[in-house]
């Protein structure tokens, strides 16, 4: 084994090769994940974790699959934290008043910025909430776009806002009511419904392989 | 963790040739050249990596050893030990797999008239923890004026080496634009121009710019929107409760056995129809390759369906994505989306030379990278002994302007930054990685699963678990499309089936028969499947494990 680091998992000391992610280090010492692992690549938000470092007062949070272990890390396993998600009909939600009806608690935002500081994606989470309150749906949707819904922000928020659910609604509202609809798409759908391509495709379906190959080459000229 | 000295030296050569390469038009290979490079270098063409399946409808067909091992295995549940008389959930439609295909199927089954209380989703991890959420690059649809479903059809067929099932390809391309429209209506934030028309990029093997994206989080954006919609409707999802076996009544599928991974309890589900949407098999690590796939991609659906008599097809071909991360160690195998090449980054060898067109079909591109590393020996070695080639990402900003990477490839940029590499300044190291299950369970155009003597009653399938749509090689952007189109068709077909059929008896007779055949073959009884999850525990620990309770 090359260089190693010492870590503490649920209080017990282990030695692991350096350069592993927290997820791989836990597996290395014998844990088998059921909860707390999804994509293993930073896209699903299943592996939210908190940790401390030796001689440091701070409580850190991050994604276990995207954080490298360091010497003296204190690690635990926590499952994904549940949160209430109201039901709504996106076609009926168009502006800030509507959003506030679904998530009235966002008005309680203390602007403490804890959410922003805890975001493993490095997003301006507090700004997302503040943008909504200012009525800037576009900005809120764009700022939150890279959210993987890991829920760390909501776990730490003193106002108990579920930012990732709120941001989900805002993006859908923006996508549905604010982004213009594609005319090209509509035109093509109409053509397809009128059967414009059906016959040609049915003809291709019956062609022998050599003929298809020839056409395939032809459209590449 | 930026690059060590040795790798730096090669990066300098890449930098020296960059300007020259910017103007360089690299020739695409002819069909003959493609065939040759595939035969010599693609992992699929190594005969020792496959063997004939010894049991069931596909007896005699070739598949990767890892897949055949699972097919030639005893069930993890002993049919004698379960009591099927007590039903835990009694619904019209059971959907197995809460990824993209499963969620789309649930929504469309509901749109087709099934009340939400009559729909149940079983899934292995959380709802949405899947390959679907990981897709970065985009989704294909022929909606641009210079494009057409006919061109899309030809591209899918050519990419698949003309082995695709034509009627499935027809459904795929003709339904594509209306799927995107549905997404628009649900509020998916596609990349658009000011007039609302879609921005499109080329993809490997497409003759037009046909790739639609939502930055490089396309899969996540679609998945979280459809999941939100399913939650709004109140469709029930049993998480951490994978299906371990289907239940049958005289050949008809009538339910499934689920397993609570935390308490070990089983649940008996009775349903009129079952939709299989369990996704792919990346976590089998075929031929020892690392993979891009999510934790639960273990081919369970293939195994369960095969035991009820489903036919598989095109299982001899596996998709290796040409560009998996090869450095640093923490992210080895993870995907570097094809969009990176779509935006202009070239694969470059140790000497700073471009050696292949950046957008050949995936299998050809992968083979060319393997050739560069292992025949020509012009790869770059990492401190842990991985070998890869450069993907010259700084070119992207030379072509499209500063800031392009952070705005269009923010997931990639973020991943590399986390591990100390700035891909706007330095190239990144890549090598092929196990990516996609090209083949799978055979379905017809109504998403009904086919067995040896036609349709298997009550069983539908959609998404990566199925075969035929992509032939022997899937093109980028066509599987997000696939799970949407066939998820929808499966939901509609199953809803219709539920209207005219009642419920059946619940038995494991098919499993008992399968076990008898295994016994005759002399398969060792400790070989069990489905796999459910891979085991990555350290070897040293496993050697000293006591299974006490
Ligand atoms: C990293 C990555 C990037 C990709 N990029 C693109 C892209 O840009 N464009 C594109 O078109 N395609 C892309 N793909 C491919 C595409 O994402 C998948 O093929 C597609 O999403 C598969 O959808 P699915 O619903 O069939 O499977 P999945 O989305 O994987 O869903 C299957 C679900 O079933 C669950 N499951 C498995 N076994 C069981 C069981 N026994 N019981 C219950 N549930 C079970 C799984 O956990 C999972 O939740 C990419 C794939 C990966 C991995
Ligand atoms: S496991 Fe998905 S983000 Fe870490």
Image (cartoon, helix red, strand yellow):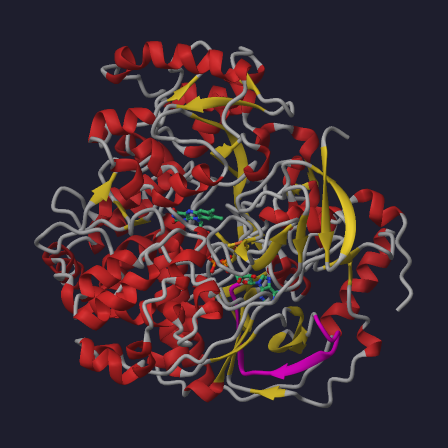
Answer whether residue A116 is visible to the viewer in this image: yes
Q: Nearer the viewer, residue A213 or A72?
A: A72
- Seen at 66% across and 29% down, the residue is B47
Q: Residue A11: give x, y in percent of width and height.
A: 75, 58
Q: Quadrant of residue B433?
A: top right
- Seen at 72% across and 57% down, the residue is A32
Q: Residue A140: give x, y in percent of width and height.
A: 24, 63
What quarter of the picture does the C terminus of chain B occupy? bottom right
Q: Is residue B470 above or below residue B98?
A: above
Q: Is residue B461 above or below residue B106?
A: above
B513 on left or right of A203 = right
Q: Is residue B267 magenta?
A: yes
B192 on left or right of B330 = left
Give the magenta range. Answer: B262-277
Q: Is residue A130 magenta?
A: no
- Seen at 40% across and 80% down, the residue is B496
Answer whether residue A211 is visible to the viewer in this image: no
Q: Residue B470: give x, y in percent of width and height.
A: 43, 46
B146 on left or right of A206 = left
Q: Is residue B347 above or below residue A81?
A: above
B248 on left or right of B391 = right
Counting every numbered tag in the picture gives 0
Q: Residue B110: give x, y in percent of width and height.
A: 38, 81
Q: Quadrant of residue B362?
A: top left
Q: Nearer the viewer, residue A164 or B96?
A: A164
- Seen at 36% across and 66% down, the residue is A112
Q: Is residue B273 above or below residue A34?
A: below
């Amino acid at each position: 084994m090359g260089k190693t680091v010492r870590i503490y998992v649920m209080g017990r000391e282990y030695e692991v090769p350096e350069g592993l992610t927290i997820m791989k280090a836990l597996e290395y010492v014998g844990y088998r994940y059921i909860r707390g692992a999804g994509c293993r690549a930073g896209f699903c938000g299943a592996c939210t974790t908190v940790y401390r470092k030796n001689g440091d007062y701070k409580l850190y949070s991050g994604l276990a699959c995207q954080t490298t272990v360091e010497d003296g890390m204190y690690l635990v396993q926590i499952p994904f934290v549940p949160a209430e998600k109201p039901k709504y009909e996106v076609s009926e939600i168009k502006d800030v008043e509507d959003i506030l009806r679904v998530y009235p608690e966002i008005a309680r935002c203390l602007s403490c910025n804890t959410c922003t500081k805890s975001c493993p994606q490095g997003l301006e989470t507090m700004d997302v909430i503040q943008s909504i309150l200012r009525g800037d749906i576009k900005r809120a949707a764009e700022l939150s776009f890279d959210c993987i819904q890991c829920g760390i922000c909501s776990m730490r928020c003193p106002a108990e806002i579920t930012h990732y659910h709120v941001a989900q609604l805002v993006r859908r509202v923006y996508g549905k009511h604010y982004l213009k609809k594609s005319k090209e798409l509509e035109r093509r759908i109409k053509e397809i419904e009128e059967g414009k391509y059906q016959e040609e495709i049915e003809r291709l379906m019956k062609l022998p392989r050599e003929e298809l190959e020839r056409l395939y080459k032809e459209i590449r000229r | 963790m930026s690059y060590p000295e040795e790798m730096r030296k090669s990066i300098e050569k890449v930098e020296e040739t960059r300007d020259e390469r910017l103007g360089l038009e690299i020739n695409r290979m002819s069909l003959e050249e493609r065939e040759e490079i595939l035969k010599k270098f693609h992992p699929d063409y190594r005969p020792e990596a496959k063997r004939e399946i010894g049991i069931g409808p596909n007896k005699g067909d070739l598949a990767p050893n890892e897949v055949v091992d699972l097919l030639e295995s005893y069930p993890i549940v002993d049919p004698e030990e379960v009591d099927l008389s007590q039903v835990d959930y009694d619904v019209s439609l059971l959907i197995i797999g809460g990824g993209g295909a499963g969620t789309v199927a649930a929504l469309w089954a509901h749109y087709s008239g099934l009340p939400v209380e009559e729909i149940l989703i079983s899934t292995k991890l959380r709802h949405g923890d899947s390959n679907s959420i990981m897709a970065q690059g985009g989704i294909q649809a022929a909606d641009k004026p210079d494009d057409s479903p006919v061109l899309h059809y030809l591209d899918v067929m050519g990419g698949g080496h003309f082995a695709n099932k034509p009627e499935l390809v027809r459904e795929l391309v003709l339904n594509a634009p209306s799927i995107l429209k549905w997404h628009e209506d649900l509020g998916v934030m596609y990349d658009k121009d000011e007039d609302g028309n879609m921005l499109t990029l080329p993809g490997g093997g497409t003759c037009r710019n046909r790739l639609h994206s939502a930055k490089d989080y396309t899969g996540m954006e679609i998945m979280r929107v459809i999941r939100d919609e399913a939650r709004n409707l109140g469709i029930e999802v049993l998480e951490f409760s994978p299906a371990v076996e289907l239940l049958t009544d005289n050949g008809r599928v009538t339910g499934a056995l689920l397993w609570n991974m935390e308490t070990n309890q089983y649940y008996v589900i009775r349903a009129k129809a079952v939709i299989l949407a369990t996704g792919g098999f990346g976590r089998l690590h075929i031929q020892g390759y690392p993979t891009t796939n999510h934790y639960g991609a273990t081919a369970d659906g293939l195994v369960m369906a095969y035991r009820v008599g489903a036919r598989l097809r095109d299982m001899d071909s596996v998709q290796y994505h040409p560009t998996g991360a090869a450095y640093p160690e923490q992210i080895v195998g993870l995907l570097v989306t094809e969009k990176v090449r779509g935006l202009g980054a070239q694969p470059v060898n140790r000497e700073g030379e471009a050696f292949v067109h950046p957008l050949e079909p995936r299998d050809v591109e992968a083979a060319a990278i393997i050739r560069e590393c292992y025949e020509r020996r012009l790869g770059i070695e990492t401190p842990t002994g991985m070998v890869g080639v450069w993907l010259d990402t700084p070119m992207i900003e030379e072509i499209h302007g500063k800031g392009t990477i952070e705005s269009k490839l923010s997931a990639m940029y973020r991943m590399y930054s986390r591990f100390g590499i700035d891909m706007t300044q330095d190239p990144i190291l890549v090598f092929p990685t196990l990516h996609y299950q090209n083949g799978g369970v055979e379905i017809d155009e109504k998403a009904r699963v086919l067995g040896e003597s036609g349709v298997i009653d009550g069983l539908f399938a959609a998404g990566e678990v199925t075969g035929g749509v992509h032939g022997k090689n899937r093109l980028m952007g066509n599987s997000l499309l696939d799970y949407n189109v066939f998820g929808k068709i499966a939901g509609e077909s199953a809803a219709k089936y539920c209207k005219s059929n009642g419920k059946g008896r619940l038995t494991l007779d098919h499993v008992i028969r399968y076990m008898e055949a295994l016994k005759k073959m002399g398969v060792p009884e400790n070989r069990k499947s489905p796999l459910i999850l891979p085991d990555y525990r350290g070897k040293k620990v496993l050697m000293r494990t006591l299974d006490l309770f």
